[in-house]
Amino acid sequence: MSHVVEPDIERLKLPDGYFVDVKKELNAGEYVALLMDQGKGVYFAKVLHYVVSWSLVGRDDKPLPYSLDMPTKDRLDTLGALNVATMKALIEAVDAHESAQEQERMQKKTTPTTSRVLNQTSEYVAQ
């Protein structure tokens, strides 16, 4: 098992056929930055740290720009300009994604370490 986060992206469905691409998992630095932003009251902090891109459109039905290449302030301004229903859909999608990732991590936590220790102990005792 690697202790380093792979920079994978996962596509999540949004209502009306739209999608949002999110980081599959935050690394430790990103996670700490998220916690710090939440502590400072940065609105939409979780969405800001997970969302990589999306298929959302603006008033003119043209793609609404959003990428990690944009300055944080511009991304926050874009998030703040969304209608409430869209923001709720983004928050729900990111929250569900984060919960699913946590469940996956918990399922991967098996007890091979315990069994390895038991095997090594029994081998030591057998000597």
Image (cartoon, rainbow, N blue to C red):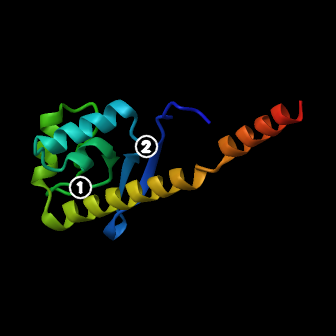
Q: Residue 84: give x, y in percent of width and height.
A: 14, 65
Left or right of 104 in this view: 70: left
Disc 2 secondary structure class: loop
What's the mark number on residue 77? none
Rounded to the nearest angstrom, the CA distance separating label 2 from label 1 is 26 Å
Q: Can residue 75 be seen at all in this image of the molecule?
A: no
| Other residues around mark 1 within 10 Å, as few (<14) / some (14–19) / many (≥20) | few
Left or right of 71 in this view: 23: right
Q: Can residue 41 be seen at all in this image of the molecule?
A: yes
Give the residue type at disc 1: Val
State the quadrant of the N terminus: top right
Residue 126, quarter of the rendered image: top right
Mark 2 vs mark 1, foreground winner is 2
Disc 1 secondary structure class: loop
- Residue closer to the observer: 117 or 5: 117
Mark earlier in primary sequence (2, 1): 2
Name the residue carrying label 2. Answer: 25
Name the residue carrying label 1. Answer: 57
